[in-house]
Image: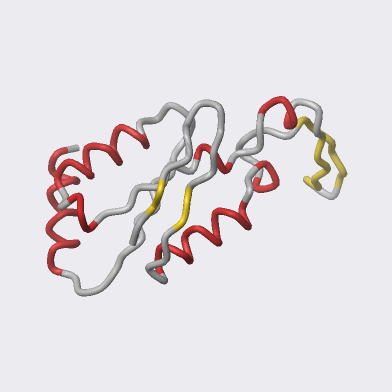
Amino acid sequence: MDNILHNIVNRINKMDGRMVIGISGHGASGKTTFAKKLLTHLERKRVNYINTDPYIVNSDVRKHTSIQYEYNNEIHQSKMTACHPAAHHLLALDRDIKMVREEMDFYTLDVPYERSQLISS
């Protein structure tokens, strides 16, 4: 992992302008750990970190929500999981990423497990 972090930091340091880095993966795969290690290698004053977990629809809502999808020309219905795009507040996430790119200040979503934070460009 250290080699990957080193390569990313070198690339960022050679760039002009702003960059958005998205880190994706399955639940509990180490995304937050990787992001926090990356933060320790970068100049903190130049970095904004947005945890996207608060943009996932609450599990209390998802467990009572079913979705339809087509597979092999057949319609299926299943419980919504956090992997489904409809299980995310994508409009809010898109708005917040655009605000970072436009160097606008905003507060992150406030959820029970993570308090709202000021993202200051």
The answer to which of 80 and 70 lies nearer the viewer is 80
Q: Is residue 31 left or right of residue 88?
A: left
Q: Residue furthest right?
A: 75
Q: Is residue 54 above or below residue 9?
A: above
> x and y percent of residue 75 in the render?
87, 43
Q: Is residue 9 left or right of residue 59?
A: left
**What's the coloring here?**
secondary structure
**Which quadrant, please, contains the N terminus?**
top left
Q: Is residue 34 above or below residue 119?
A: above
* Figure disc tally: 0
Q: Residue at x 35, y 48 (%)?
A: 49
Q: Is residue 64 left or right of residue 100?
A: right
Q: Is residue 44 above or below residue 102?
A: above
Q: Is residue 94 left or right of residue 105?
A: right
> x and y percent of residue 65 in the render?
80, 33
The answer to which of 36 and 120 lies nearer the viewer is 120
> x and y percent of residue 12 in the render?
19, 61
Q: Residue at x 81, y 47 (%)?
A: 70
Q: Residue furthest bottom?
A: 16
> x and y percent of residue 26 in the render?
48, 34
Q: Residue at x 44, y 39 (%)?
A: 25
Q: Residue at x 46, y 64 (%)?
A: 99
- Examine the image and state in which quarter residue 40 appears: top left
**Which quadrant, please, contains the C terminus?**
bottom left
- Examine the image and state in which quarter residue 81 appears: top right
